Image (tube, rainbow, N blue to C red):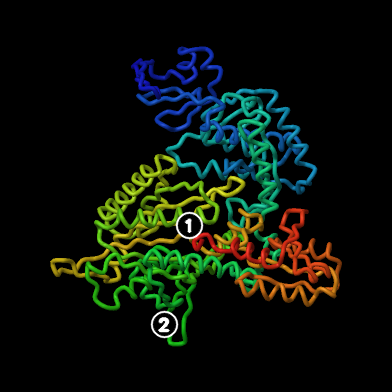
Amino acid sequence: MTDVTLTFPDGAERKVKSGTTGLEVAKSISPSLAKRTVAMQLDGALADLSDPINKDASINFVARTDPAALELIRHDAAHVMAEAVQSLWPGTQVTIGPVIENGFYYDFAKQQPFEPEDIAKIEKRMGEIIARNAPFTKEVWSRDKAKKFFKDKGEYFKIELVDAIPEDQELKIYKQGDWLDLCRGPHMTSTGQIGKAFKLMKFAGAYWRGDSTKPQLQRIYGTAWTTEDELKAYLHQLEEAEKRDHRKLGREMDLFHFQEEAPGSVFWHPKGWTLFETLIAYMRRAQNRAGYQEVNSPDMMEKHFWELSGHWENYGENMFTTVLPDERVFCCKPMNCPGHVQIYKHGLKSYRDLPLRIAEFGKVHRYEPSGALHGLLRVRHFTQDDAHIFLTEDQIMDECLKINDLMLAIYKDFGFEDVFIKLSTRPEKRVGADELWDKAEKALSDVLSEVKRRSNGQIKTSINPGEGAFYGPKLEYVLKDAIGREWQCGTTQVDFNLAGRLGAFYIDEHSEKKTPVMIHRAMFGSLERFTGILIENFAGHFPLWLAPLQIVVAPIVSDANDYASEVAEKAKALGLRVSTDLRNEKINYKVREHSLAKVPVILVVGKREAEENKVSMRRLGSQDQTVLGLEEALKALATEAVPPDLR
C-alpha cells in the first residue's frame, strides 16, 4: 500500500498509508484531538471523518466549535428532524432538506397538514434522538438496491432523486441508528454533536422541486447554532426585525402602500415621498460637490438598442417589453447605462474631457417573480442613484478611490460605519473578451487592496466569485444595521465592454480614437430599497433632519388653537416640516397617535404656553417634557434639522 502526504495548516507534513481515515490520523496525533474533531477538510472541502484518504492533500481537522462546523450542525439537525417527523407520523415521505442561511428546512409529503402544536412535539422528539447520540455512518449502495428499498418503504420522491443522480456519482446512504436517508453528506460523527441550540421556526407550503405543476409538500423551517447563546441572540434579532419591519412601520407612519394592480411598484404617500425627496436632495448635493453632471434619459427605448448593448441577450428575461401598432418592440429600461452612453456620444470628446461624470435618478423596471417581491426591499419599478464615469484606463484607480471615499462619507452620515466590501468577479453569462475581464478584475482588486491599506485593515473585504455584472466585475458595499443585519447597497463596476459595443470613443493626445472605460456607480443603489433599510435601521425613529414630518404642534385646549397655528407657521418659516393637530381630542390621545406615527417632536401648547410664548417639547420615546421659550425651541430644532452634509 502506497503512502500519501498530508499537509497541516501550520505547514507540517505527515506520511500515512493510502486508505487511512481522518479519524485514524487524528487518533495518531492525540486522543483529545480525535475526541473533539467532528469532521475534516481535505483541500478545503468538508469530508466525513471516517472517509479514507487516498491521495496527497492539505488536511484540517474541524472541531464542533469551529465556524466550518456550523453548516454540519444544521445539516445533521435537518436529518434528525426528518427522523423525528417519520417516527411521530409513520407513512410520511421525506423529500429534500438542505442547509440554508441561518438554518435548514425539510419538505414532507404528509396526508394531513401539520398543526401549530406539532412544532413542540417534533422538537421534543429531536431532543430525544440527539440525546441517543447514535453515530452517523455512510454506506454506498447500488441504484437498484436504493430504489427497491425506497419503493418498499413507500418513499416515491426518493426514487426520483435516485434517478436524478448522475451515473458517475456514488449513491450515498447515511444512517443514524436505524433511520437512514439518501444524502451527499458529509455529517458529523454522531447526532449528539448537534447539541441543544436548535429551534423549529414555522411551517410553509412548497412544491416538489419548486415546480407548481408538481405535488404540494409541507415544509418545516428550523435554525441551529453552535451555542445556546448564539441561538438566543438570533431569536432576539428576529424579534427586533419583526418590530422594525418597514412594511408595518410604513403603514403606521403613513409612508406608502402596495396593491395588486401594480405588483412591485410603490404608491408613495405625502410623508413617504417627502422622505424619498430628502434622500434625493442629499445625494444631489453630494454628487454636485463631487463633479457629477445630472442628466435624464428615456424610460423606454427600442429593442434593437438593447441588443447592441448586450442586455437583450444577457438580461432579456428580466425586461418589460411592449409592441407598438407599427410592430416596433420597445423595452422599459432595466438600467440607465446605455442611455448615458448616448448622452456621452452627443458631441466629440477629448481625453481632456475625461473623467466625465454623468448622474441620473433614473426610474428602471426589472421583472422580479411575484414570490420574490418584498415591500420596498424587492420591487419591479425603482429609482437608482445611478452614475457613469467615462475615463481612461490609467484614471481607474484614482476615480474608484474617490467613489469609495464619497460612499463611506455618505454611509457615515446615515449612521452606517461598519462597511464590508466584496469584489464580485466574472459570471458565466457575460460579454467581452477574457483579456478585458482580466484587466477589469485586476483594476478593482488593486483598488480593494488600496482601500484596505488606507483603512489600516479596518475595512473587511472578500471575493464573491462569479457574481459580477454581465459587462464587468464590481465592488459591492455591504452595510451592517443597528441589529447586526447586512445589506448590500452601493456598487462600483469597471466596464471595458459597453462603451465599445455602443460606439463611444474619445480623441487621445495623439489625435487617435480610443474607447473609454466606463465605471458604473450607485451609492444608495435602489432608493426604494435604501428607504426600506433606513426605516428598519432606525425602527422609524429617524433623526430630525431625515424625518418626513419633524414636528406636530398639539394644543391641549381649543383656546390655544390660534397659538398652535402661529407656532407652526414660525417653524415652517425656518424650513421645518411641521403640522398642527387641532382636533377636539384629549392631549394624551394625540401624543399616543403621533408617537405611533414616529413623529420625532411634539410641541404641546395650552393657555399658559400661549400667554408666556412658550412650548412644552416632548421627544419620541421619552415621557419627559421640557418647557422652553418659543424662539429658543424653534432655533434649536432648526439647527438640529440641518442635514449632516450642510453643517
The answer to whether 113 is drawn above or below residue 178 in the figure is below
Q: Residue at x 31, y 73 (%)?
A: 344
- Which residue in the protein does label 2 denote? 328
Quarter of image, res 19: top left
Tell me where residue 593 appears, x and y as whole percent: 78, 64
Q: Residue at x 71, y 57 (%)?
A: 620
The answer to whether 442 is drawn above or below residue 327 in the figure is above
Q: Nearer the viewer, residue 400 or 71?
A: 400
Q: Which mark is residue 341?
A: none
Q: Is residue 497 visible?
A: yes
Q: Amino acid at mark 1?
A: Ile
The answer to whether 202 is drawn above or below residue 359 in the figure is above
- Which residue in the protein does label 1 denote? 410
Quarter of image, res 182: top right
The answer to whether 563 is drawn above or below residue 458 in the figure is below
| Left or right placement of residue 84 versus residue 316 in this view | right
Q: Amino acid at mark 2?
A: Arg
Q: Is residue 260 visible?
A: no
Q: Earlier in the sequence, mark 2 or mark 1?
A: 2
Disc 2 to disc 1, how far (Cα)? Answer: 42 Å
Tell me where residue 12 appears, x and y as whole percent: 36, 19
Few, some or many residues within 10 Å of mark 1 (<14, 14–19, 20+)? many
Count of labels in the image? 2
Tell me where residue 598 appears, x and y as whole percent: 70, 61
